[in-house]
Image (tube, helix red, strand yellow):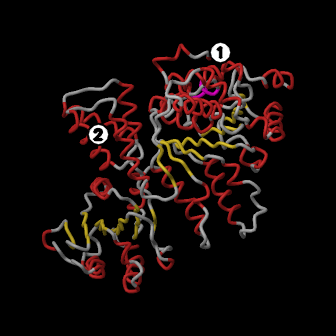
Amino acid sequence: MNFREEFKLLLRARYPLIYIPTYEEERVEAAIREEATNQGNRPVYTWDFVDGYQGNPNDAGFGRRNPLQALEFIEKLPASAPAVLILRDYHRFLDDVAIARKLRNLARLLKSQPKNIVLLSPRVAIPDDLSEVLTVVEFPLPAAPEIKIEVERLLQSTSNSLSGKVLDDLVLSCQGLSMERIRRVLAKAIATHGELQPEDVDLVLEEKRQTIRQTQILDFYPATEQISDIGGLDNLKDWLIRRGGSFTEKARQYGLPHPRGLMLVGIQGTGKSLTAKAIAHHWHLPLLRLDVGRLFGGLVGESESRTRQMIQVAEALAPCILWIDEIDKAFAGVGSKGDAGTASRVFGTFINWLAEKTSPVFVVATANDIQALPPEMLRKGRFDEIFFVGLPTQEERKAIYDVHLSRLRPHNLKSYDIERLAYETPDFSGAEIEQTLIEAMHIGFSQNRDFATDDVLEAASQIIPLARTAVEQIQQLQEWAAAGRARLASKHSPLKDTFDKLR
């Protein structure tokens, strides 16, 4: 049931006190007026603390700076006269004993009258003594069809047009913003170059970053990495590219559900975090990074409240990518911690949301020690797929060297023996290859010359890869993946033959 249907039902059922948490006063009031008109042309009165009542010339300004008088005005209206009364920012007065008592009296009185009081507030703040008489109705952010109408209206006003794909991308990037913010950022784009352009998607993402800055739980990451920046991992990249259009309206019309998420399991430094950033860039979605440690607060109930806040912010900015790095460290040993069950409750809230969420929030979780995670996290329904990201093969190491050297020395790429470099660095992860190149650059820079293949090999000889210092842990992880518990991210992984035999 959408907002209009639910609100119409509450009007007909004579619900006396309706509480709508929203920042979009203008948009929700327009929707309320439309429904009031459809319900027999009900008059709508609007009150705020500064200007008092508006909507009736005879009572203009009544109740100015007097919230109790604003409620007494309702009793002045004829009992049989239908009306909808909108009280803005009224949550600030609900803790007053006189206001609370008056609202409860009105709740009884208005059951027999065709009147409804609507309290508008930016957030839910209801005292316990009013929880039984107030009915909370969620007012959602604008959906894709509504945003598309607004974008097309702006396009007509500027006499320019966008292709269907670009228009869909722009509409998709605007989801999660209020209509006022959408109009503001699109007006900024038009003021910049006189028309809407495909590049304006980045302006919209910057507007979303402003919303994220207001919370201390999530970080907004600029996603500049591309799928092509990932060396190897062909199975994983194919899987991601295939789902590139899954958040569009065209996919909804086709009947596709929103992708739920992805868990990347594997050895440190093999490109799991890079993949999360590349997904956001390729899909033109904002990237939110969750530090699970920030969810845990010192006060009773604070951790659970922060978890709910994180979910609300992520869903408000949907469609988006929610990146949870090293989730195994956050929830390892849940249930055995001496924290009075706080970690278990946070974990329970989080995995229930993973299983039940319908919002287009794509969760990318990375883990190094999969065995430390509770089994509930891994069951089907939480994530669309679990991929194992192992150490790169020789061919993948060539691709990784090519990616980094193309960025560092694009004019001199052919002077490096990439084939030899890949052969001489077995068991090196992508992060270790990058560090090897940085060390080689230090060698060349210190001798006032450009670095060469021999410098890279010298640097590699001085680095001991993690595959040699943590042999037991990596072997356990590879055995876990080889048992068929995860999909292999690489097409030519050395685990593939083992996996095929076990099947």
The outermost residue toward the top is 414
Instruction: Name the residue type under label 1.
Output: Glu
Residue neighbourhood size for the residue with mark 2, other residues' Cα within 10 Å, grouped as few (<14), some (14–19), many (≥20): some
State the residue position of label 1: 419
Image location (x, y in percent) of residue 79 = 29, 75
* Residue 237 covered by magenta stretch: yes
Query: Does residue 153 sit above or below 316 in this rendering?
Result: above
Marks 2/1: CA–CA distance: 54 Å
With respect to residue 23, does 467 lie above or below?
above
Which residue is at the front of the view, 487 or 94? Answer: 487
Could you say which quadrant of the image residue 276 lies in? top right
- Quadrant holding the C terminus: top right
Q: Is residue 26 left or right of residue 123?
A: left
- Quadrant of residue 293 within the rendered picture: bottom right
Q: Which is more toward the observer, 478 or 438?
A: 438
Residue sitting at x 23%, y 32%: 195
Is residue 486 located in the magenta-colored stretch of the structure?
Answer: no
Please say if 470 is above or below 96: above
The region drawn magenta spans 236-240
Label at residue 231: none
Task: Looking at the picture, tell me which residue is in the foreground, 65 or 471.
Answer: 471
SS at circle 1: helix
Image point 19% across, 28% down: which residue?
Answer: 159
Residue at x 27% of width, y 46% of height: 184
Give the side of residue 354 with respect to residue 185, left or right: right
Categorize mark 1 by other alpha carbons within 10 Å: few (<14), some (14-19), many (20+): some
Q: Main secondary structure of the magenta part?
A: helix
Q: Position of residue 283 (x, y in %)?
A: 48, 32
Mark 2 highlights which residue? 150
